[in-house]
Structure formats: structure tokens, C-alpha cells
Amino acid sequence: TVMSFIYPDDCDWDETTRAISLVEEDVHAHLTEEENAGLDKALKTISIFGIGLTLLLVLIWPLLTLPAGVFSKGYYTFWVIISMIWGFLAMLVMLLLPLWESKGAIIGGLTLGKVIAFEAKDRMAEREEAKLGKEDVEDVEDAVESE
């Protein structure tokens, strides 16, 4: 901040804002109907599992402890072990799922981008196939290979 006061930058904000493209103008910013349907299905699945898990943890789990009354040492040990297993499995999911979801980027980094470029060409060919129809698949594959 101090350096900005000493050496101010002559910035033309009008030029800067004109250079930024709007999302509405970006052809890659819009989802296909198939992608929207997939997102709707994922939302429904996540909602069902989220509500079910909330009911399990907030209502059912505590209700299961009521018949026991005061916990004996063995019963308390059982619940502690269940809680530890639950926490360990949750930790594994939180660690492994992001790694799995970003495996393409990780492999791309390890292979210096060769694998990502290959996967991107496959994805581009699949999109073109969906748009053009199956009879034009060979033409799209030839165009992708020439790039």
C-alpha cells in the first residue's frame, strides 16, 4: 500500500472493464440440458442424503441411548468406539473425495499436462458428438486429431 502511494499506477478503469468479458457472452459458461439434468439429479440425491443423515445424527442416534439410562462402562465404551469409527470414516471421505475429484489436475501436473490435453480432446469430441449426432462423429474425431 505504501508503494502505491509513492509510485501510483496510471490505471484506465474504462479500458480495464471493457477487456473483461461477461458471463452471458461466454459460450463455455452455459450448461447443456443434459448437464442441467445431471445437476438437478445430484441436488435431489444430496438433499435426500443430507436430510436422512441429519435425522440419523440428531434424532435416531440420541434416541438409541435412551433405553440404556445411565451408561455402564461397557456400553459407554461401545458408543465411544462407534463415534471414533464414524469420525475416522468421515476423515477418510473428506481426504479422499477431493483427491479423487481432482485426479485429472493432479495427473496433469505430474505428467506436465499431457494427460489433461488428451482428456480435454475426448471431452470436446463427446460434446460435438452430442451436438451433431452420431453420423458426424468421424468428422469431429478427425478435427480433434488435427488440432
Image (cartoon, rainbow, N blue to C red):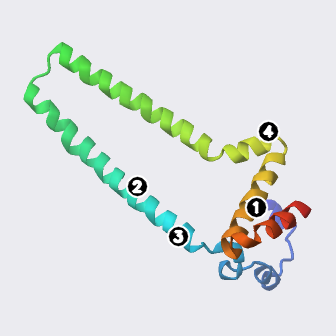
Q: Is residue 22 visible?
A: yes
Of tags 4 and 3, which is closer to the observer?
Answer: 3
Name the amino acid, label 4: Leu
At numbered mark 4, what does the secondary structure look like: helix, strand or loop? helix
At numbered mark 3, what does the secondary structure look like: helix, strand or loop? helix
The reply to whether callout 2 and callout 3 are in contact (CB within 8 Å) is: no
Q: CA distance from mark 2 to mark 3?
A: 15 Å
Q: Report which residue position mark 4 lands on.
A: 110
Whichever of callouts 2 and 1 sits on the residue coming sooner in the sequence is 1
Of tags 2 and 1, which is closer to the observer?
Answer: 2
Name the amino acid, label 3: Asn
Q: Report which residue position mark 3 lands on.
A: 36
Q: CA distance from mark 3 to mark 1?
A: 44 Å
Q: Residue 76's image quarter?
A: top left
Q: Return the x and y of residue 91 as percentages of the image width and height.
A: 47, 33
Q: Which mark is residue 145?
A: none
The reply to whether callout 1 and callout 4 are in contact (CB within 8 Å) is: no
Q: Quadrant of the C terminus?
A: bottom right
Whichever of callouts 4 and 3 sits on the residue coming sooner in the sequence is 3
Q: Report which residue position mark 1 lands on.
A: 1
Residue drawn where x is 91% and y is 63% of the image = 146
Q: CA distance from mark 1 to mark 4?
A: 37 Å
Residues 113 and 135: in front is 135
The reply to whether callout 2 and callout 1 are in contact (CB within 8 Å) is: no
